[in-house]
Amino acid sequence: MAESINRYFQFLQSSSGARPSGKLWYPAADVYQTPEGWLVKVELAGVSAEDIEIEVEGKNLNIAGTRKDNFCQKGISYHQMEITYSRFEKNLEFPDVIDNAKLEHNYENGLLLIYLRKK
């Protein structure tokens, strides 16, 4: 109950486009090794493509951004709120250096697909 009340006050006090409903969240990811390199799928339902940051450094792939609640407006109250609207991060470590890989990405249907292809 206290967590629900805290979430409500965070919602009311938010003045930016993002209305946080919780702390930093960590989206689910699948990682596949392919003959061409690696494929990473990250579940980011409700996140705008322009709010996603991708960085490769050494053996690490870092994905970050923000999921914003663009549906809430003044005068609306909620009955139930379970989706987290806040900053997210996903940090994946690979067995070998990947910063020399060719990075391609595609975002569709709430899934971010990142291809790390061998050069």
Image: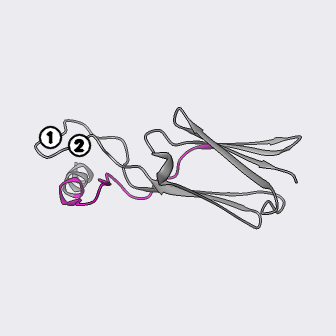
| Residue 6 appears in the rendering | yes
Horizontal and vertical percent position of residue 119: 88, 54
Q: Is residue 60 above or below residue 77?
A: below
| Residue 89 appears in the rendering | no
Q: Residue at x 14, y 40 (%)?
A: 76
Left or right: where 94 falls relative to 49: right
- Callout 1: helix, strand or loop? loop
Q: Is residue 36 above or below residue 26?
A: above
Q: Amino acid at mark 2?
A: Cys
Count of numbered labels shown in the rendering: 2
In reply to whether residue 23 is colored magenta, the answer given is yes
- Callout 2: helix, strand or loop? loop
* Residue under pointer 2: 72
Q: CA distance from mark 2 to mark 1?
A: 7 Å
Q: Residue at x 84, y 60 (%)?
A: 96
Q: Nearer the viewer, residue 3 or 83?
A: 83
Q: Residue at x 47, y 53 (%)?
A: 51
* Residue under pointer 1: 76
Q: Nearer the viewer, residue 63 or 25?
A: 63
Left or right: where 60 falls relative to 74: right
Q: Which residue is most to the left?
A: 75
Q: Residues within 10 Å of mark 1 (few under 14, many from 20)?
A: few
Is label 2 in contact with label 1 (beta carbons under 8 Å)? yes
Left or right: where 48 falls relative to 38: left
In this picture, which residue range is highlighted in magenta? Answer: 10-29
